[in-house]
């Protein structure tokens, strides 16, 4: 089961989905596009454990973390 974790000022929200379920996969890809379109950065880890920024949806990622833009001030 794959997970998308969305960070915000209230903490985090987790969205689990089965990558083998076509409808769940479409919802996850839609969520990815909506969040990155709203300015969130998506990141996951490679097989070797290195973090990587995702610019496109990766249905094979076990866990994708979305965090909002950092605003200085």
Image (tube, rainbow, N blue to C red):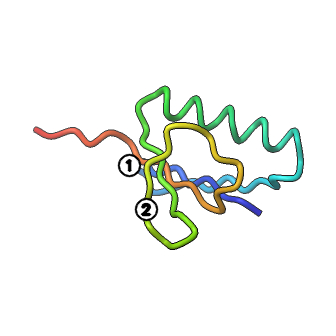
Of 19 and 13, which appears nearest the observer? 19
**Helix, strand or loop at mark 1:** loop
Residue 26's disc is none
Q: Nearer the viewer, mark 1 or mark 2?
A: 2
- Mark seen at residue 51: 2
Q: Quick one: which residue is furthest to the left in this view?
A: 73
Percent x, y of residue 7: 46, 51
Element at label 2: strand
Percent of width and height locating residue 69: 32, 39
- Residue farthest front in this picture: 48
Along the horizontal axis of the image, is 49 left or right of 28? left
Q: Residue at x 79, y 43 (%)?
A: 25
Q: Marks 1 and 2: CB-CB under 8 Å? A: no
Q: Mark 2 Cα within 10 Å, few/some/many (few <14, many 20+)?
A: few
Kindly identify which residue carries mark 1.
9
- Does residue 58 sit above or below 71 in this rendering? below
Q: CA distance from mark 1 to mark 2?
A: 22 Å
Pick the residue in front: 36 or 58.
58
Give the quarter of the image for residue 1.
Answer: bottom right
Front residue of this view, candidates 25 and 5 = 25
Residue at point 53% right, 34% down?
Answer: 35
Question: What count of labels does the image hold?
Answer: 2
Q: Measured along the vertical axis of the image, is residue 65 above or below residue 71?
A: below
Image point (43%, 49%), residue name: 53
Residue at 77%, 53% in the rendered image: 17
Residue 73 sits in which quadrant? top left
Q: Is 55 positioned to the left or the right of 18 in the image?
A: left
State which tag comes first along the sequence, 1 or 2.
Answer: 1
| Crowd band around label 1 with a 10 angstrom C-alpha radius: few (<14), some (14–19), many (20+) | few
Q: Position of residue 60 (x, y in %)?
A: 70, 55
Across and down, in percent, residue 13 comes to 57, 53
Quick one: which residue is furthest to the bottom in this view?
A: 48
């Amino acid at each position: 089961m794959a997970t998308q974790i969305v960070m915000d000022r209230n903490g985090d929200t987790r969205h689990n989905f089965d990558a083998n379920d076509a409808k769940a996969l479409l919802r996850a890809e839609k969520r990815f596009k909506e969040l990155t379109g709203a300015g969130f950065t998506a990141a996951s880890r490679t097989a070797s454990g290195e973090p990587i920024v995702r610019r496109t949806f990766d249905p094979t990622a076990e866990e994708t973390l979305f965090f909002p833009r950092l605003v200085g001030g």
